[in-house]
Image (cartoon, helix red, strand yellow):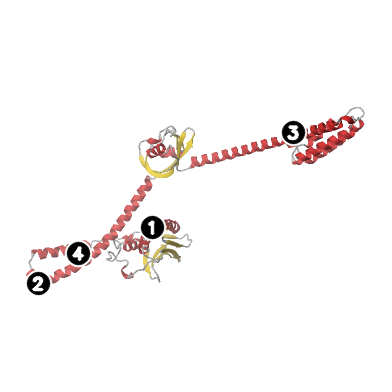
C-alpha cells in the first residue's frame, strides 16, 4: 500500500485521534519515569503521524508543543535547558518538515506520473482513431520520406495504385506521382500545403488524373510529405460529357434561331423573286432562274427540323445545393466587382425538375447581365430571392441598374442593340423550357428583375 494512502482525507480524523492519544500516553509515561529516564524523544512518532496532514506553520507550533511537554514531564538539569530546548525543538520541527516535504514531493511526482500516463493514454487513443480513420478512408493516403520513397500507405492507396501484396512501402513516389516528387525536391527549404491536379500512374503502368491534397513537414531525417489522393478520371469524363452535351444543346438552339432568321429572309427573297418573274426581260435568264433555285434551296435548308430541346426531360434535383453553389459563385463575382449581394433565399428542401448544369448556366448568365448593367450605376446591388408554391419554385434576380428600355425584345435572338451576342437570354430561356421551366421579365420600379420558374417534382 502506498504511504500516501495513509494520509488520505478519509484517514485524517483517525490519524489525528491516534496522534493525540499517543501524545497523551507518552506524556503520562514520561511523567511516571522522569526520575529514572526521559522518553520525550518518543514524541517523534506522533509528529511523524501528523506531518503529512499539517502545513509548515502548524508543524513548527506542534514541535514547540512537544518540546514543552518534554521539558515539563522530564527531570533534566535546568542549567542546560536553553540549549536543550533549542535542539529539541529543531529536532521535532526538522523531522516534521522533512517528512512533510517528502510526502509533498511524492504527491507531485505521482500527480506528474498520472498526468504523463493520461497524456500517453490520450495519445494512444488519438493514434488509434487516426489509424482507424486512415485505414477506413476511401481516399488514398500516403507519406513519403525526404528520399522520395513511400513510408506508409493505406488500403485505399494500394487499391488506387494497383499495388500487389508487397504494397507501396519503399517504392519511389516519382514513379507514381511525379508532381509530388518535384514538390518534395523544391520544398526542402520551406514547408508547403496546397492542392493540385496532376497525372498519376499505377504500378501496372496505367495512367489516370489524380486530385492531390498534400503538405510537407519536418522530421529528423529531413522534410517529409503527406498526401491524400483521389482518382478524378471518371469526374473528368463526366464533366467533359456534360460540357459537350450543353454545347450540343446550345448549338441546336442557336441553329434553330439561325434557321428561323434565314427562313424569314429566304421567304422574303422568294416573294421578291416571284414578283420579278412577271418582268418579260428576266424570263428565260439563266442567272435569274439560278437565283430562284438558290433561294428555294435556302428555304428548304432553313426548314430542316433539328431535335427539339423541349423534348428533353429534367431530372429531380434538390434545389438547396444548387442555390448554395450559386451563392458561392455570386459572392465571388460581386466581391470582385464591388457589388452588394442581398441573399433573400428561403430555407427549402424542395426537389425540382431541372438539369443542374443548365440551371447553373442560366443563373450565371443573369448574374453576368446584372454585373454588366451595374458598371455605371451609382448604387450597385444584386438581390436574389425565392418564392414557393405547391407546384412551382420561383427564383428572382434583381439589380439596381438602369433597367430595360424595350422589354418586349429581350428574349429575341440576334438583338442589334445587345452588348454581347444577343443570345444569352434566348438560349437561357430555351434551356429552361427544355425541362419544363421558364425565364421571364418582371417590371420593377428600379433596375431589372428576372424570374426563373421551376416545376416541383
**2 or 3: tag closer to the N-terminus:** 3
As drawn, 19 above or below 445: above
Label 3 residue SS: helix
Query: Is 45 placed left or right of 219 in the picture?
Result: right
Nearest to N terminus: mark 1 or mark 3: 3
Camera-side mark, 4 or 1: 1
Is residue 225 something one can see in this rendering?
Answer: yes
Q: Pinpoint residue 340: horizontal percent, then vertical percent.
A: 43, 62
Q: CA distance from mark 4 to mark 2?
A: 23 Å
Residue tagged 1: 360
Counting from the top left corner in percent of width and height, residue 56 is at 76, 39
Of the numbered discs 1 and 2, the one sitting upstream in the chain is: 2
- Which of disc 1 and disc 4 is earlier in sequence? 4
Label 2 and label 3: CA atoms lie apart by 135 Å
- N-terminal-most mark, 4 or 2: 2
x 35%, y 52%: residue: 242
How far is disc 1 from disc 2 in space, using C-alphas? Answer: 56 Å
Kind of element beneath mark 2: loop
Between the residue at mark 1 and the residue at mark 3, the CA separation in whole angstroms equals: 80 Å
Which SS class for mark 1?
A: helix
Label annotation for residue 299:
4
Look at the numbered discs 1 and 2 and tell me whether their residues touch, using CB distance below 8 Å.
no
Amino acid at each position: 500500500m502506498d504511504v500516501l494512502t495513509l494520509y488520505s482525507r478519509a484517514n485524517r480524523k483517525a490519524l489525528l485521534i491516534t496522534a493525540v492519544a499517543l501524545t497523551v500516553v507518552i506524556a503520562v509515561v514520561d511523567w511516571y519515569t522522569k526520575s529514572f529516564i526521559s522518553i520525550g524523544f518518543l514524541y517523534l512518532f506522533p509528529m511523524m503521524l501528523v506531518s503529512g496532514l499539517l502545513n509548515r506553520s502548524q508543524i513548527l507550533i506542534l514541535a514547540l508543543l512537544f518540546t514543552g511537554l518534554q521539558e515539563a514531564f522530564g527531570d533534566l538539569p535546568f542549567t542546560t535547558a536553553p540549549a536543550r530546548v533549542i535542539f529539541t525543538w529543531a529536532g521535532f520541527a526538522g523531522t516534521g518538515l522533512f517528512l512533510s516535504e517528502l510526502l509533498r514531493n511524492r504527491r507531485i511526482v505521482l500527480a506528474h506520473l498520472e498526468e504523463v500516463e493520461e497524456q500517453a493514454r490520450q495519445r494512444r487513443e488519438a493514434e488509434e482513431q487516426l489509424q482507424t480513420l486512415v485505414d477506413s478512408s476511401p481516399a488514398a493516403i500516403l507519406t513519403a520520406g525526404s528520399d522520395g520513397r513511400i513510408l506508409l500507405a493505406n488500403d485505399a492507396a494500394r487499391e488506387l495504385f494497383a499495388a500487389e501484396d508487397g504494397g507501396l512501402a519503399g517504392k519511389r513516389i516519382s514513379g507514381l506521382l511525379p508532381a509530388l516528387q518535384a514538390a518534395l525536391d523544391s520544398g526542402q527549404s520551406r514547408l508547403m500545403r496546397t492542392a493540385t491536379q496532376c497525372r498519376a500512374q499505377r504500378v501496372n503502368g496505367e495512367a489516370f488524373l489524380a486530385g492531390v491534397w498534400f503538405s510537407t513537414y519536418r522530421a529528423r531525417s529531413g522534410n517529409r510529405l503527406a498526401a491524400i489522393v483521389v482518382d478524378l478520371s471518371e469526374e473528368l469524363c463526366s464533366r467533359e460529357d456534360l460540357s459537350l452535351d450543353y454545347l450540343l444543346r446550345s448549338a441546336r438552339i442557336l441553329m434553330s434561331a439561325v434557321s428561323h432568321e434565314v427562313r424569314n429572309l429566304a421567304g422574303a427573297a422568294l416573294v421578291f423573286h416571284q414578283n420579278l418573274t412577271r418582268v418579260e426581260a428576266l424570263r428565260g435568264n439563266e442567272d435569274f432562274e439560278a437565283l430562284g433555285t438558290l433561294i428555294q434551296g435556302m428555304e428548304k435548308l432553313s426548314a430542316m427540323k433539328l431535335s427539339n430541346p423541349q423534348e428533353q426531360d429534367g431530372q429531380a434535383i434538390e434545389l438547396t445545393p444548387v442555390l448554395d453553389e450559386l451563392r458561392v459563385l455570386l459572392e465571388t463575382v460581386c466581391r470582385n466587382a464591388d457589388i452588394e449581394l442581398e441573399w433573400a433565399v428561403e430555407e427549402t428542401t424542395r426537389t425540382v425538375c431541372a438539369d443542374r448544369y443548365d440551371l447553373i448556366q442560366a443563373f450565371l448568365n443573369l448574374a453576368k447581365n446584372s454585373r454588366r448593367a451595374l458598371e455605371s450605376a451609382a448604387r450597385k446591388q444584386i438581390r436574389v430571392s425565392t418564392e414557393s408554391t405547391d407546384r412551382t419554385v420561383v427564383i428572382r434576380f434583381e439589380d439596381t441598374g438602369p433597367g430595360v428600355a424595350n422589354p418586349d425584345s429581350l428574349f429575341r435572338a440576334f438583338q442589334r442593340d445587345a452588348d454581347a451576342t444577343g443570345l444569352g437570354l434566348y438560349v437561357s430561356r430555351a434551356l429552361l423550357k427544355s425541362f419544363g421551366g421558364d425565364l421571364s421579365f418582371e417590371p420593377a420600379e428600379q433596375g431589372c428583375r428576372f424570374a426563373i420558374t421551376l416545376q416541383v417534382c
